[in-house]
Image (cartoon, helix red, strand yellow):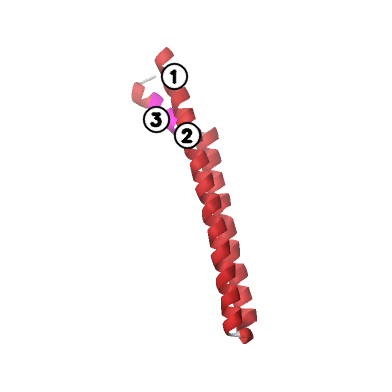
């Protein structure tokens, strides 16, 4: 019984570290995406000012898609933290 509790604690610890890395990568990726979207839009407006309305519309569409990415990742991270599937798999493998 003691081994199972230790294994479960190890799984939760590893999951917490993994979730931290996943959230950091999602935040970094989203920030880089926002920067690229905005910089390329401004670059396009500087090259062809008459295209500003079309470029701004596209920028806001893609910015909305870029903004949804961290929230989807956050949902997966919360699932891993609070409904940890690895614990169930471990207990099923041990036959407990």
Disc number for residue 92: none
Magenta range: 84-91
Other residues around mark 3 within 10 Å, as few (<14) / some (14–19) / many (≥20):
few
Residue nearest the observer in this picture, 69 or 89:
69
Q: Position of residue 87 (x, y in %)?
A: 44, 28
Q: Relative to residue 31, is residue 38 depicted above or below?
A: below
Mark pair 2, 3: CA separation: 14 Å
Q: Is residue 14 visible?
A: yes
Q: According to the image, label 1 marks what residue?
A: 6
Task: Kindly state the secondary structure of the residue where label 1 is placed.
Answer: helix
Total numbered circles: 3
Q: Is residue 62 magenta?
A: no
Q: Relative to residue 85, is residue 48 depicted above or below?
A: below
Horizontal placement of 48 versus 89: left or right? Answer: right
Disc number for residue 15: 2
Q: According to the image, label 3 marks what residue?
A: 89
Q: Is residue 1 visible?
A: no
Task: Kindly state the secondary structure of the residue where label 3 is placed.
Answer: helix
Residue nearest the observer in this picture, 18 or 76:
18
- Which label's residue is closer to the chain start, 2 or 1? 1
- Quadrant of residue 75 in the image? top right
Whether residues under marks 1 and 3 lie with C-beta atoms below 8 angstroms apart, the answer is no
Horizontal placement of 9 versus 74: left or right? Answer: left
Q: Position of residue 92 (x, y in %)?
A: 38, 26
């Amino acid at each position: 019984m003691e081994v199972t509790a230790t294994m479960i604690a190890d799984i939760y610890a590893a999951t917490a570290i993994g979730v931290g890395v996943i959230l950091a990568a999602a935040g970094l990726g989203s920030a880089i995406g926002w920067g690229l979207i905005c910089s390329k839009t401004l670059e396009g407006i500087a090259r062809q000012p008459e295209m500003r309305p079309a470029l701004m519309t596209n920028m806001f569409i893609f910015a909305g898609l870029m903004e949804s990415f961290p929230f989807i990742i956050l949902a997966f991270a919360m699932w891993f933290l609070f409904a940890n599937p690895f614990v169930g798999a471990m207990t099923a493998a041990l036959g407990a």
